[in-house]
Amino acid sequence: MQIVVLTLTFSLPGCRSLKEKRQRIGGIHERYGRNPAVAVCESGDRERLDASEWTFVVVGNSSQELDSLCSEIEDRIQRTVEARVTDVVRERL
C-alpha cells in the first residue's frame, strides 16, 4: 500500500466573506470524501477570505493508481471550483 499527500492552495480574488468563500470552494469535502481511497480536509488559510488550502490523503496499491487519482482530483478541481489553484504539492509517504 502506498500513500500520497496532495496539497492544493487556492487564491480567491475578490472574495468578501466567509460565506462567499464556502460557496466558491464548497463541495470539495463532499465530492472527494466519498471515495474510500481519499481523505480530505481544509488544512490551511481557514480564516482568510482570499485564500484556502486543502489536503488530500490518497491511498492506493501502485504508483500508477495514485498518480491517476491525484491527477483526476487536480483536473476536476480546476474545472469545478471557482478559485485559482496557485500551488500543488504531492508528497509520497
Image (tube, rainbow, N blue to C red):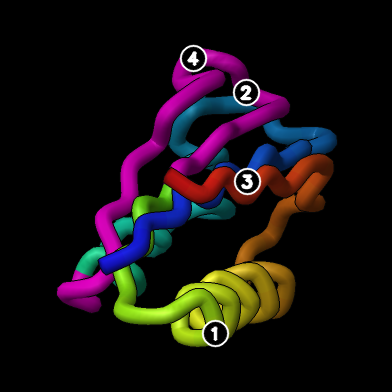
Task: For the residues labelled 1 and 3, say whether their Cβ atoms are less than 8 Å apart.
Answer: no
Q: Earlier in the sequence, mark 4 or mark 1?
A: 4
- On whether residue 45 falls in the magenta region, the answer is yes
Q: Residue at x 59, y 16 (%)?
A: 48
Q: Secondary structure at mark 3?
A: strand
Q: Quadrant of the N terminus?
A: bottom left
Q: Quadrant of residue 51?
A: top right
Q: Mark 2 Cα within 10 Å, few/some/many (few <14, many 20+)?
A: some
Label ID, residue 49: 2
Q: Alpha carbon of mark 1 to alpha carbon of mark 2: how far?
A: 36 Å
**Image-based side of 30 in relation to 28, left or right:** left
Amino acid identity at mark 4: Glu
Task: For the residues labelled 4 and 2, say whether their Cβ atoms are less than 8 Å apart.
Answer: no
> Mark 1 — residue?
64
In the rendering, at what x and y percent does residue 9 appear?
Answer: 67, 38
Q: Secondary structure at mark 2?
A: loop
Q: Alpha carbon of mark 4 to alpha carbon of mark 1: how far?
A: 36 Å
Tell which of 72 and 28 is nearer to you. Answer: 72
Q: Alpha carbon of mark 2 to alpha carbon of mark 3: how far?
A: 16 Å
Is residue 37 depicted above or below 28 in this figure? below
> Mark 4 — residue?
47
Task: For the residues labelled 4 and 3, say whether their Cβ atoms are less than 8 Å apart.
Answer: no
